[in-house]
Image (cartoon, rainbow, N blue to C red):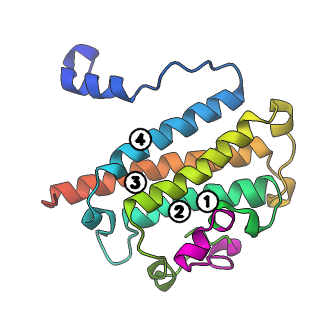
């Protein structure tokens, strides 16, 4: 398929997805650009989503879109705080911004390596995640992404190439942030897929 075969409506939608001009000069800028692109796309799809779709699952063993979005923010929160900086969980946005207190949900010690980020959760542990609304999910996601963006804006590329505190120093700070960013991008695709499944089944 070439550009002449693509419907004009599709091209217009894709053009609207292109971010405003960003002066890409360093690898930090690339990460920030991708970070903001993911955020913009997530806001667009979740902002227009019904609560019913947000919490729908295609089968009993699957995660809802709400759980996926919370995981996206939570994993980045854990990675920047613990894996990159080596700080305690109390410094994560989930705790420092009052989310744990407001929701009554403390995920520390749950799942893989006690991250509390859905990875390695049992079905019962997933069921224990609060039923967040779209605005809540996006607000937490924004808290985390603003923190990551500020971190990147204030670090040199040389510093990002030093060993991260977590993973026994096997990865650089840059690589840890990149891993979380790529995980976010993958899950954004998962959200689109779940939404498409819902629509094919006749959901509104």
Relative image position of residue 94 (x, y in whole percent): 63, 65
**What residue would you read off at disc 1?**
75
Residue density around tag 1, few if under 14, some if 14–19, many if 20 or more, within 10 Å: many
Residue density around tag 4, few if under 14, some if 14–19, many if 20 or more, within 10 Å: some
Relative image position of residue 115 (x, y in whole percent): 67, 70
**What residue would you read off at disc 3?**
190
Quadrant assignment for the C terminus: bottom left
N-term-proximal mark, 4 vs 2: 4
On screen, residue 67 versus residue 88, left or right, reads left
Residue at coordinates 46% horizontally, 82% vertically from top-left?
A: 123
Say which of 154 and 73 sits in front. Answer: 154
Q: Give the CA distance from mark 4 to mark 3.
A: 13 Å
Relative image position of residue 13 (x, y in whole percent): 28, 28
Q: Give the CA distance from mark 1 to mark 2.
A: 6 Å
Q: Give the CA distance from mark 4 to mark 2.
A: 16 Å
**What residue would you read off at disc 4?**
41
The stretch in magenta equals 95-114
N-term-proximal mark, 3 vs 1: 1
Tell us which disc is closer to us: 4 or 3.
Answer: 4
Q: Give the CA distance from mark 3 to mark 2.
A: 12 Å
On screen, residue 196 versus residue 69, left or right, reads left
Callout 4: SS = helix
Residue at coordinates 78% horizontally, 35% vertically from top-left?
A: 154
Callout 1: SS = helix
* Vertical position of residue 116 compared to residue 75: above or below: below
Q: Is residue 14 among what the camera can see? A: yes
Q: Give the CA distance from mark 1 to mark 4.
A: 18 Å
N-term-proximal mark, 3 vs 2: 2
**What residue would you read off at disc 2?**
71
Q: Are marks 1 and 2 in contact (CB under 8 Å)?
A: yes
């Amino acid at each position: 398929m070439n550009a002449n075969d693509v419907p004009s409506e599709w091209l217009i939608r894709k053009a609207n997805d292109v971010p405003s001009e960003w002066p890409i000069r360093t690898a930090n800028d690339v990460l920030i650009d991708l970070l903001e692109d993911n955020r913009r796309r997530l806001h667009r799809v979740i902002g227009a989503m019904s609560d019913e779709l947000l919490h729908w699952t295609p089968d009993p063993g699957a995660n809802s879109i709400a759980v996926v979005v919370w995981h996206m923010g939570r994993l980045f929160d854990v990675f920047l705080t613990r894996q990159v900086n080596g700080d305690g969980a109390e410094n994560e946005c989930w705790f420092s911004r009052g989310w744990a207190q407001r929701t009554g949900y403390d995920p520390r010690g749950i799942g893989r390596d006690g991250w509390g980020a859905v990875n390695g959760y049992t079905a019962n542990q997933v069921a224990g995640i609060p039923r967040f609304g779209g605005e809540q999910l996006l607000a937490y996601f924004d808290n985390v992404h603003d923190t990551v963006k500020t971190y990147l804006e204030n670090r040199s590329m040389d510093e990002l190439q030093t060993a991260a505190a977590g993973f026994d120093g096997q990865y650089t700070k840059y690589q840890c942030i990149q891993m979380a960013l790529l995980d976010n991008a993958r899950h954004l695709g998962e959200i689109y897929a779940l939404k498409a499944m819902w629509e094919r089944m006749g959901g509104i």
